[in-house]
Amino acid sequence: MKRLMNPHADDGRNHTVTVTTDDQQRQVEDELVQTVLASFRNTPDPRLKQLMEALVRHLHAFLREVRLTEAEWQHAVDFLTAAGHITNDNRQEFILLSDVLGASMQTINMNNEASAGATEATVVGPFFVEGSPEIPLGGDMAFGAPGEPCWVEGTVTDTDGNPVPGTRLEVWEADEDGLYDVQYDDGHTAGRAHLYTDDRGRYAFWGLTPTPYPIPHDGPVGRLLEETGRSPLRASHLHFMATAPGLRTLVTHIFVEGDQLLDSDAVFGVKDSLVKRFERQAAGTPTPDGRDLSGQSWSRVRFDIVLLPEPSPGRSK
Ligand code: BEZ
Ligand code: FE
């Protein structure tokens, strides 16, 4: 420790102040990290212990790397407080935060290794809602939501190529104004449904040709995007969740070939294998099921889904 004259003393006496060297400062900081780590040493659950210890190490490394100021720390607390205040049953600002930081997608990448030709997973997003209406094969999940009709068809198979009859498919998407039904003022259900594959693993339904839309950006996450010069827009997509006994549940979307936003999706959700050709059909083109679209144009897309086996017991995934 060095002892120096206090430059701020104005009473003419020889005051000294204690100044720590870089080494001493580092030691103080290191000691705190070790003390905090030690506070978790009796955690009974080994996984929780591992998570907390790694969190402490990385968090302190971040704080020390950027030399966080107290004002910045307060700003971060205010940000998280605002994220809490705006969160409710229909708005999940913490998922959004995880999404725009790439944390959601990285967690999915680590837990859904592309394997055996299985369909790749991507983010679930905040707009999945339990209890969607059931539609029959060939039914319409738009329920009046505005947009261009889109015929979606495909199969569900396992990784050996066997069809998977009775797979429950949840499908949901934004309307052409970029809104999910949960964002409508009157809260009516539209743009979401579930259906089941037939005895040959086939499915088909009417949805909407996906269009780009911004993630909710009127809260703290939106301000973060603005302050960092990032766009809130998501590449156009249609969400799927496929569930079948004995097979791993898949949460994914399909994206639209040629969409300008494929390389700049706000939540890093695009995977090449999920980009599909939506074939545009001029008004008047006969529809696959004979539906009369009253002179509207429409599109069609094929999405064949391959599900992985359920992880065997004893494996973490
Ligand atoms: C979505 O695709 O619905 C979504 C995903 C992440 C953040 C916001 C929305
Ligand atoms: Fe979405």
Image (cartoon, helix red, strand yellow):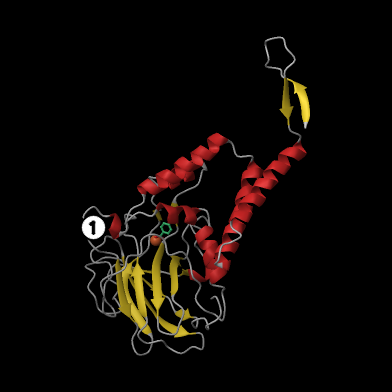
Which residue corresponds to mark 1? 187
Point 49% across, 82% down: residue: 310
Of the four image quadrants, the one with ligand 1 is bottom left
Specify whether 22 is left or right of 292: right
**Residue 290 locus on image (x, y percent):** 25, 78
Q: Is residue 112 above or below residue 63?
A: below
Please indicate, yes or no, whether residue 68 appears anywhere in the rendered image.
yes
Along the line of sight, the residue nearer the viewer: 283 or 54:
54
Specify whether 66 is left or right of 230: right
Along the line of sight, the residue nearer the viewer: 49 or 236:
49
Q: Is residue 189 above or below residue 135?
A: above
Residue extending farthest top: 12
**Residue 22 locus on image (x, y percent):** 75, 37
Point 37% across, 89% down: residue: 200
**Residue 136 locus on image (x, y percent):** 26, 79
Q: Dividing the picture into quarters, in which one does residue 49 lie?
A: bottom right
Q: Dividing the picture into quarters, in which one does residue 13 lie?
A: top right
Please indicate, yes or no, whether residue 266 appears anywhere in the rendered image.
no
Q: Dividing the picture into quarters, in which one does residue 114 lie?
A: bottom right
Task: Work out which quarter of the rendered image holds the N terminus and state it.
Answer: top right
Q: Look at label 1 and name its amino acid.
A: Gly
Point 31% across, 64% down: residue: 148
**Residue 43 locus on image (x, y percent):** 56, 62
| Secondary structure type for disc 1 | loop
Specify whether 144 is left or right of 277: left
- Number of labels in the image equals 1
Q: Is residue 300 above or below residue 213?
A: below
Mark 1 is surrounded, within 10 Å at the Cα level, by few (under 14), some (14 to 19) or many (20 or more) other residues, namely few
